[in-house]
Image (cartoon, helix red, strand yellow):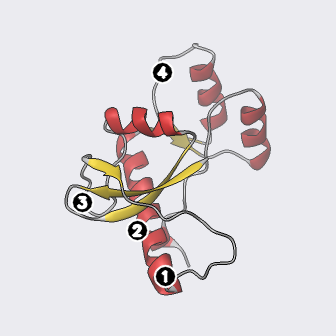
Amino acid sequence: MIAYNLRCHKGHEFEAWFRSSSAFDEQVTAGHVTCPSCNSVRVEKAIMAPAVAGTKKSRKPAAEARQMRQFMTGLRKYVEQNADYVGPQFAEEARKIHYGETPDRHIYGEATPEEARELIEEGVDVAPLPPDPDSAN
């Protein structure tokens, strides 16, 4: 997994994780990467400082927490707007899509940790959806 600092055309900066640099390129080209602040799809990589062991982080914890919350909210919103909710049938539907038994589409729903582990072992691409920070305790 690769974390990129990203910036939209309006100057909002955020971070996103990708399986590879080519996955980033594919998702940006397809318009699947959106700014969590303004939903713009005009996104590019921002300048990143290399991670060097032993250096102090200049960011304040509150700013990091705010940025993480913003990213999680944007990711969750994107998935909810661009995928079909299949509820507790997630594992079954994901398998059907993976094995070509049903048309390819984006889905989200619920799965037990064991179901998620089995899907990963079968080679089905799955990832946990961040919780809704606004509905958290």
**Looking at the rendering, in which quadrant would you find the C terminus?**
bottom right
Identify which amino acid the numbered label 1 is placed on: Arg
Q: State which quadrant residue 50 falls in.
A: bottom right
Circle 2 sits on which residue? 70
Sequence order check, earlier mark of 3 and 2:
3
Residue at the spot 61% in from the left edge and 21% down from the top edge: 98
Q: Is residue 59 left or right of residue 114?
A: left
Residue 68, how many percent across, how many down? 48, 69
Identify which amino acid the numbered label 4 is placed on: Asp
Name the element at disc 3.
loop
Q: Is residue 36 left or right of residue 93?
A: left
Sequence order check, earlier mark of 4 and 2:
2
Residue at the spot 49% in from the left edge and 77% down from the top edge: 64
**Mark 1 crowd level (few <14, some 14–19, many ≥20, 10 Å Cα):** few
Sequence order check, earlier mark of 3 and 4:
3
- Residue 59 badge: 1
Q: State which quadrant residue 26 falls in.
A: top left
As measured in the structure, the alpha-carbon distance from the residue carrying label 4 to the one carrying label 1 is: 41 Å
Sequence order check, earlier mark of 1 and 2:
1
- Residue 12 badge: none
As measured in the structure, the alpha-carbon distance from the residue carrying label 3 to the one carrying label 2 is: 11 Å
As measured in the structure, the alpha-carbon distance from the residue carrying label 3 to the one carrying label 4 is: 28 Å
- Residue 38 badge: 3
Name the element at disc 1.
loop
Which numbered disc, 4 or 1, marks the residue closer to the eye?
Answer: 1
Identify which amino acid the numbered label 2 is placed on: Gln
